[in-house]
Amino acid sequence: MTKTWLAGLAAFAVAAAVAFAIYESRSGIGRSSASGRKILYYRDPMHPSYTSDRPGKAPDCGMELEPVYADRADSARGAERAAGSGVISVSREQQQMLGLHLAKAESSAATGTIRTLGRVMVEEDRIFPVTAGGEGWITQLAPGAASGDLIKKGQVLATVYGREYATAERTFLYALRGLETSRNANLGDYQDQPAVVLQEARLVLQNMGFGDEQIEQLTKTRQVILDIKLTAPADGVILARNAFLQRKFERGTELFRIADLTRVWISADLFGDDAARIKDGATATVSVPDRPGTKLRATVSDSLSKFDEQSRTLKLRLEAQNPGLLLRPEMFVNVEFTVRLPQGLTVPAESIVTSETHQTVFVQQKPGTFVARAVETGWRFGGRVQILQGLKPDEIIASSGSFFLDSEERMRASDANGHD
């Protein structure tokens, strides 16, 4: 009986030892590394707040979890903080291995270039539509009056016929005869009325597309002209032509759209920070991608910038002279702004470590030792960041490689909070 009981107890002890060995093998807790150092737990090297009792991969970034040893030495970082001092010590060899460089907080002004893409647009007050003053038919299209053609003011665009055009001509002739009759009669206070009526009749003809030449012909011959020649109201380029031979049109139809391109608008896309640095009246250099060496000057207008919801940018409007009509509507151009920001205490942009609640730099207390310090920043431009509070001139800080110091700071805080 006693032997049987002892044999069962021995079997249970062996099974328990095997189970513990399996658990310890799987979890890794309490295991020692090849160097004999005891492993406390494993943590995410990118987010030290995530820990695990067994090796594996971090769920967020897929990196291998790194072991944390009982002596708290971090083999991956190689940095060592003096206990309770808040200081991170990094040897010269470790600095070289981590690519850690130093920089000085110094007073400087930022000068740089903001480059963006712009789209050429026609100035709204330089668009001249030729609209049908009445219904009619296109009887003839003039040569050189197609979309894209350059035209001169008064140039014939098309010949049309319509009863409403003839009616407008007769109204003009009646007004002309009325003016002549009034000159031979004493009308008192109404003696200027016939001249006003004639002027109105002339404006009607001009708005219907009559050129000065045909109005002069009508004045001399006193005969209604059936074939009306529609002429260009200004120099420019025909942007669109909706007139076709033998095609009927209705009153109000836009037959031609003409634009004066000697001045154009340019719509430039800028993100919020860049747009805030460019003021009304600032100048920019405009170049055409397929014409290297050709540059124009443009000026920022005082119009309100429009926000584009899709691109998340502000549409800034510039005005530019267009010699030789180099810039055409809808053309894409390169736009460059030269920006100068005021003097201030600055550090390299890569030295700033940003979290959700604050921004930090690592200040060198003495060679090889660093301490984290919160700072308040201002403008950020040209690889420099303005420091409003938190640093003094000539203080030495970690620039490139400060990410590793921040990782060490976070891991040490994690150890102190949950794994002492």
Image (spheres, rainbow, N blue to C red):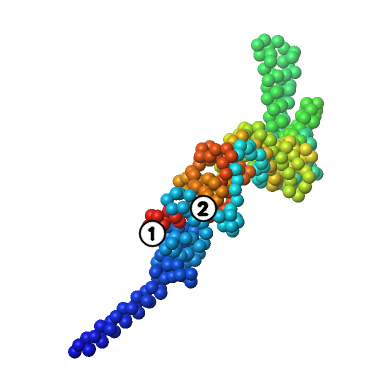
Residue at image position (34%, 75%) is 20
Count of numbered circles in the view: 2
Of 398 and 310, the residue lying toward us: 398
Residue at image position (78%, 45%) is 293
Q: Position of residue 201 (x, y in %)?
A: 69, 26
From the viewer's perspective, tell me whether residue 356 is left or right of residue 285: left
Q: Position of residue 208 (x, y in %)?
A: 69, 34
Q: Position of residue 325 (x, y in %)?
A: 77, 40
Q: Secondary structure at mark 2?
A: strand
Q: In which quadrant of the rendered image does the N terminus lie?
A: bottom left
Q: Nearer the viewer, mark 2 or mark 1?
A: 2
Question: Residue 190: which quarter of the image?
Answer: top right
Q: Earlier in the sequence, mark 2 or mark 1?
A: 2
**Res. 260 in view:** no
Of 242 and 82, the residue lying toward us: 82
Dot 2 and dot 1 residues touching (CB under 8 Å): no
Residue 36's place in the image compared with 393, above or below, is below
Residue at image position (59%, 48%) is 102
Question: Residue 127: which quarter of the image?
Answer: top right
Residue type indicated by callout 2: Ser
Residue 372's place in the image compared with 94, above or below, is above
Q: Secondary structure at mark 1?
A: loop
From the viewer's perspective, tell me whether residue 300 is left or right of residue 31: right
Residue type indicated by callout 1: His
Residue 177's place in the image compared with 68, above or below, is above
Residue that numbered label 2 is attached to: 89
Tell me the distance, in whole angstroms, between the alpha carbons under discs 2 and 1: 21 Å
Toward the left, the furthest residue is: 1
Q: Position of residue 128 (x, y in %)?
A: 69, 36
Label disc, if present, on residue 419 of the rendered structure:
1
Q: Residues within 10 Å of mark 1 (few under 14, many from 20)?
A: few
Of 168 and 144, the residue lying toward us: 144
